[in-house]
Amino acid sequence: RRNRPKYTGLRAHAKKMMVHKWRSQEQAILTGTKTIVNDNPQLTTRNWPGKSPLRVAIDRNLVISAKAAVFDNSADTLIINQLKDSVQGNIQFIKADFNNLPREINAILYTKNVQSVIVEGGLITLEGFIKTDNWDEARVFVSKSYFVKGTKAPKLNEAAEQELALPNSALYIYKQQPRAS
């Protein structure tokens, strides 16, 4: 596939299997436009047995190509956008208010009885959920290799509750702490 990342080092097969197992344990998986355009992920559990989660793609102005993997009919898919409401097979386009998008997405998912979502977005998508306290847990892979190019990961204001050493990387698990009212 065009624009697919090479799965070496940080994205070794064992890590892909782990991530796909996590996907199979959640009701939905969400990512943003840039991740889909740049990486063309399937957002399925193809490397782990089990049902693929509902795919949720943020595509404000409907710029994602119809040839993108999220349109491959392998899993039910929601496209959150600001232009149209429609259904095309197992793809549902939902017009949303982008002023407080994380809250809007949570409301949409609630109407569909979705109680859990894994966000595999890039910086913009992840920061949107982090800054509005719309997260419970974060699982962060940190490579032992230094990357010359790329986007920095968003910052979490929590201490990692757990650290797992993996070949060539580490996995940090963060849990959001209750905030004082």
Image (cartoon, grey):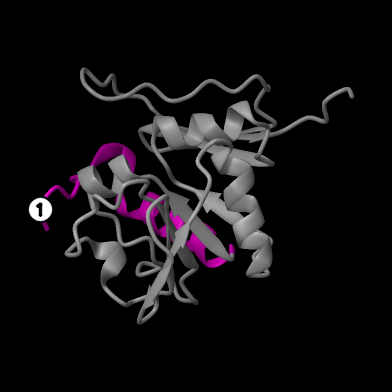
Say if residue 172 shows up in the picture: no
Residue at figure coordinates x 60%, y 48% from the top left: 104
Find residue 15 and report its horizontal and vertical position in percent.
40, 50
Look at label 1 and name its amino acid.
Answer: Arg
**Residue 14 lies within the magenta run:** yes
Against 84, residue 92 (above or below) is below
Label 1 secondary element:
loop
Please tell me which residue lies in front, 111 or 116.
111
Residue at figure coordinates x 39%, y 60% from the top left: 84
Against 109, residue 152 (above or below) is above
**Residue 43 lies within the magenta run:** no
Please tell me which residue lies in front, 26 or 162.
26
* Quarter holding residue 116: bottom right
Against 86, residue 3 (above or below) is above
Q: Quadrant of the C terminus?
A: top right
Q: Is residue 119 left or right of residue 9?
A: right
Q: Which residues are magenta?
A: 1-26
Q: Is residue 127 left or right of residue 79?
A: right
Please tell me which residue lies in front, 54 or 140.
54
Residue behind mark 1: 2
